[in-house]
Amino acid sequence: MAVPRNRSSNARKNNKRSHHAKKAVNAIPCPNCGTYRIPHHICPSCGTYRSRQFFKQEEE
């Protein structure tokens, strides 16, 4: 196995991890109901995707 020759300092270790932060979700409004949803996913509120109904939301 490969073994590092010298220990990397905390500053170098944390500099490598500077790009590991989570990115914000790119939400777009649903063309049917207007609520925000993730692109290329079924809308959780109305159940449509690309003008097709996949499930009906039950009224409480």
Image (cartoon, rainbow, N blue to C red):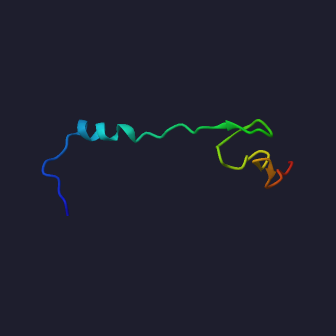
Q: Is residue 56 left or right of residue 2?
A: right
Q: Is residue 40 left or right of residue 57?
A: left
Q: Is residue 44 above or below residue 31?
A: below
Seen at 80% across and 46% down, the residue is 46
Q: Is residue 60 left or right of residue 5?
A: right
Number of numbered markers: 0
Seen at 80% across and 38% down, the residue is 33
Instruction: Point out residue 6 in the picture as x, y percentages from the top left corner.
Output: 13, 48
Instruction: Point out residue 14 in the picture as x, y percentages from the top left corner.
Output: 30, 38
Q: Is residue 22 left or right of residue 17?
A: right
Seen at 34% across and 41% down, the residue is 17
Seen at 74% across and 39% down, the residue is 30
35 or 52, nearer to the observer: 52
- Which residue ends up furthest to the right in the rendered image? 59
53 or 9, nearer to the observer: 53
- Which residue ends up furthest to the bottom in the rendered image? 1
Q: Quadrant of the N terminus?
A: bottom left
Place residue 29 in its image quadrant: top right
Place residue 36 in its image quadrant: top right
52 or 21, nearer to the observer: 52
Instruction: Point out residue 42 in the picture as x, y percentages from the top left corner.
Output: 71, 50
Q: Is residue 3 above or below residue 35?
A: below
Place residue 28 in its image quadrant: top right
- Which residue ends up furthest to the left in the rendered image? 5
Instruction: Point out residue 4 in the picture as x, y percentages from the top left corner.
Output: 17, 53
